[in-house]
Image (cartoon, rainbow, N blue to C red):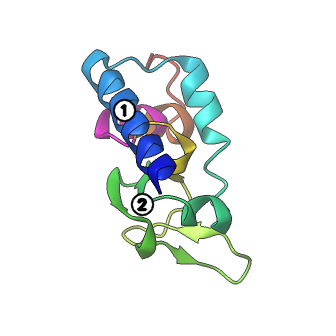
Amino acid sequence: MLSEIMDRLSFIKSYHELMKKNLYTLSMLVNANRFADNRKEELCRSLLCGCYGCLVVFLANDVRFDEDGLGRCPFCGSRHILGQSSAYPLDKGFLKAMQEYHLKGGQDVV
């Protein structure tokens, strides 16, 4: 239990540092996309998820899973969701950068 609390505190600290700096590198955008495969195990380890299809952050319990075990955003049905356990930020800035780079083909977001 203490270890879980420490992990969450560490995540929150790094999350806030990235938000302050608004520092999203191309490497982050590319690597974060690897976590958006929506595996049930990954998403169930998270408290929060963020969708870079509709830019909404929501509780992981709200993710809808298909028969194949892939998660979908409860708001827009997209499979472009990241779980908090991926350790990537779920703020609107990062989700927007992910959306621009991966869904709209933007190369100038970083």
**Quarter holding residue 47:** bottom left
Residue 84 in view: no
Local secondary structure at mark 2: loop
Left or right placement of residue 90 versus residue 85 in this view: left
94 in magenta: yes
Q: Which mark is residue 47?
A: 2
Magenta range is 90-98
26 in magenta: no
- Residue located 58% across and 69% down the image: 71
- Residue located 53% across and 69% down the image: 72
- Residue located 43% across and 73% down the image: 61
Residue 33 in view: yes
Which residue type carries mark 2?
Leu
Residue sitting at the far bottom: 67
* Depth order, front residue of 43/27: 43
Q: Is residue 65 above or below residue 39?
A: below
* Depth order, front residue of 100/38: 38
- Disc 1 crowd rating (10 Å Cα; few below 14, some 14-19, many 20+) is some
Residue sitting at the far right: 68
**Quarter holding residue 9:** top left
Residue sitting at the far front: 2
Secondary structure predominantly adopted by residues drawn in magenta: helix
Q: Position of residue 22 (x, y in %)?
A: 32, 20
Quadrant (top left, top right, bottom left, bottom right) of the C terminus: top left
Left or right placement of residue 24 versus residue 21 in this view: right
Spatial CA span between label 1 and label 2: 14 Å
Q: Position of residue 51 (x, y in %)?
A: 43, 54
Q: Which mark is residue 15?
A: 1
Which residue type carries mark 1?
Tyr
**Quarter holding residue 76:** bottom left
Local secondary structure at mark 1: helix
